[in-house]
Image (cartoon, rainbow, N blue to C red):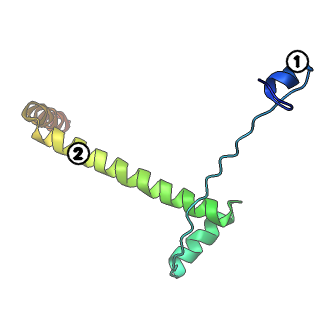
Amino acid sequence: MGGFGSGDALARRGGCITYCDTVSVVARAISVRLDDEADQALRTLEATGLSRSEAIRTALLGEVRHRLRSHELAAEVAALEADEADREEMLAVAELMEALRASR
């Protein structure tokens, strides 16, 4: 079965076979026009040692994280505002603090 150069034949002769696949992921290139403020921001990031591509990727990912966190915080605030028990407790604490301040 195993012909010349087959894995079985090489293994019997003490040889070695290495199978190698190269997976190449090519990033999508984009172009963007920068105003003066954005160009200065890019230069500031590049001055930290980041390449232009790294600086742009870092800024994009940071902005996405910031927006997601802002959205999460807004949802949390809305949930707290809708919680009547929490609002009553908050008002009671505020009244207590005001009474303590007034008694000084």
Residue 11 placed where, x, y %? 85, 21
Q: Is there a contact, CB below 8 Å, between mark 1 and mark 2?
A: no
Number of marks present in the image shown: 2
Q: Nearer the viewer, mark 1 or mark 2?
A: 1
| CA–CA distance in space, label 1 to label 2 | 66 Å
Q: Quadrant of the N terminus?
A: top right
Outermost front residue: 1
Quadrant location of residue 50?
Answer: bottom right
Q: Nearer the viewer, residue 33 or 19?
A: 19
Outermost top residue: 12
Q: Around disc 1, counting alpha carbons within 10 Å, would you say few (fewer than 14), some (14 to 19), or many (20 or more)? A: few
Which residue lies at the image location 16% right of the left edge and 32% below the top edge? 93
Q: Around disc 2, counting alpha carbons within 10 Å, would you say few (fewer than 14), some (14 to 19), or many (20 or more)? A: few
In the drawing, does residue 75 fall left or right of residue 45?
A: left
Q: Nearer the viewer, residue 45 or 88?
A: 45
Q: Nearer the viewer, residue 47 or 13?
A: 13
Residue 60 placed where, x, y %? 49, 60
Which residue lies at the image location 86% right of the left edge and 31% below the top edge? 4
Q: Quadrant of the C terminus?
A: top left
For mark 1, what is the residue? 12
